[in-house]
Amino acid sequence: MGCSDIKFPWKDISFEDAKIMANNSNKIIMLDFYSPWWGACNRLDTDTFADKHVIDFSQSNFINLKINTDTDEGFQLFKKFHGVSLPTILFLNPDGNEIDRLIGYHDANTYLGKINDVVKGVNTLDYFLQIYNQYSDSSLISLNIGNKYLERNLIDDAKPFFYNVLNGKNKKYYQEAEYRIAYLEYENNNFEPLLTFIDNNPNSDFTYTGIRTVIRYYRGSADTTEEVAYYKKLINFFPTDPNALNSYGWRMSELEMNLDDALEKTQLAVQLSNDNIGTKANILDTEAEILWKLDRVEEAIQAIEKAILLNPDYEYFINQKNKFLESL
């Protein structure tokens, strides 16, 4: 995969106009729900949506819209489709009905595989529902259906399929089903199963997501002590994950707590992110912000200039540099 000089084919039109265009062209509507300050959204722009193969396939098959959820109109559309987290990419038929969605960052190779499935109509919710009764052991199909419902925030529809997995014979999928059920219990204000899962499965990928969920809960309830404790748990469980280290560093800069430790972890994250330009630029911004909070302004300027070199068109980085310069 490689970057292209051709720009991604975004359409600057309304959602209603996109449906008309999709009907006339027999194409699928793609909605990229994003926030300009969210790192994973920016990585999609700098990495995935800059890939030539992604651009060509998207041009041929989709009507592509970017939806900024920081605007009232964008947020209302996000809520209409039961959006939960960013980035979320929806694929809709010309009538505006959902075919499938992708949540989070996906590199170009993974994204291409996903959008090929969307166009072919495979590995979608409708696809899995159609083949559900064709298998004697439907554990994997049940897990896929549960996950598809959960992505759409349809909790009551998702739960029975996760219990199907736990009641089935194939233990390979137990851990994921157990995590999903713990998460659904959390959604029903029962916190204990999720906390138990985290403590019992420190090396699980689902534990990473679970800790982030707990962090969001404590942040929303303004319990800074518990929030910071779970940030510490996150970086202790995943000490070489640049995104974990970066999120810890940025939050500590916001809280103006543990700044020396946050700087150390963020500088390690920069070293660990050398292969990913988008991630490295965002981590350099975090490093710059922490340095600025530590009154090391000249070093902060040097760090943000490195970020600008990696992503020169990102206005936020330029504004950060101006903020630092004004404080000299």
Image (spheres, rainbow, N blue to C red):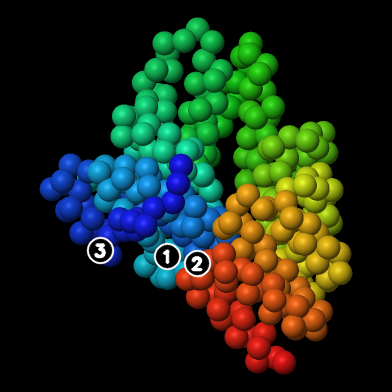
Q: Is residue 216 above or below residue 313?
A: above
Give the structural element (helix, strand or loop) at label 1. Answer: strand
Of the pair 253 and 298, the residue shown nearer to us: 298
Residue 1 bears which disc, if any? none
Give the structural element (helix, strand or loop) at label 3. Answer: loop
Tell me which residue sits at (32%, 42%) in the image.
57
- Residue type at tag 3: Ile
Of the pair 300 and 4, the residue shown nearer to us: 4
Q: Is residue 71 left or right of residue 25?
A: right
Which quadrant holds residue 319?
bottom right
Which residue is under mark 1?
A: 68
Instruction: Kindly indicate whether the residue at mark 1 contacts the one at mark 2 (C-beta within 8 angstroms).
Output: yes
Tell me which residue sits at (83%, 55%) in the image.
232
Which residue is under mark 2?
A: 36
> Residue 250 in the image: x percent, y percent?
71, 66
Which residue is under mark 3?
A: 13
